[in-house]
Amino acid sequence: MLKLHGAQARLLKVVKKEERSQHLDHIREFEDKAIRHITPNLISQGYNIERRSRGSVGDIVAIKGKEIWHIDFLYTRDVSKYPPQTGMGRQQLLLRFGRLAVYDKPITKYSIAMDKRILAEQYIQFKPIHLDIATSIIVLKEDGFEELPFN
């Protein structure tokens, strides 16, 4: 039998408490918010925006000339229930960067969009040093977004 410890057990308890449909509603609301905050700015910069289906690298793709920028949305519940120090953030990055490393279509830039700056500040510490494309975290703000590059 699998035994969960610490943050994993707390996270499982949170998921069980919250109705799955309510959780999916929160994800959809976050995705809508991300699109409202990101796409107008990108369109004004001359990008064409495409919405991608699940399973693709990125939820939206912004294309301008030879630049192909995949933007992946990362919804996180409550930071107090999913603290950055638990290692779950690192796991999220490893999964996304691993998928990105074997992606077999053109891509010149990759970003992860989120709305919790405290998580972005933790995630930005894990640098994808073996990827040959630009990577960043996009933090949603009331009036748009801020891009934090992995340097």
Image (spheres, rainbow, N blue to C red):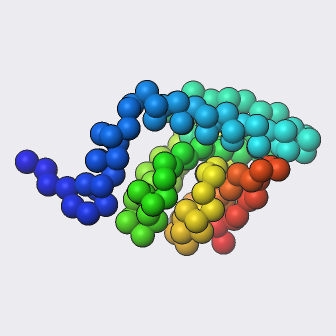
Q: What residue sits 19% from the left and 56% below the top?
A: 4
Q: In the displayed structure, does residue 84 sit left or right of residue 150?
A: left
Percent position of residue 14, x then y: 34, 47
Q: What residue sits 91% from the left and 41% below the top?
A: 44
Q: In the displayed structure, does residue 42 sit left or right of residue 103?
A: right
Residue 107, picture quadrant: top right
Residue 14 visible in the shown view: yes
Q: Residue furthest front?
A: 17
Total number of numbered discs in the rendering: 0
Which one is nearer the viewer's eye here, 83 or 145? 83
Q: In the displayed structure, does residue 141 sit left or right of residue 2?
A: right
Quarter of the image with the C terminus is bottom right
Percent position of residue 6, x then y: 26, 63
Percent position of residue 91, x then y: 40, 58
Which one is nearer the viewer's eye here, 72 or 107? 72
| On screen, residue 40 above or below 50 | below
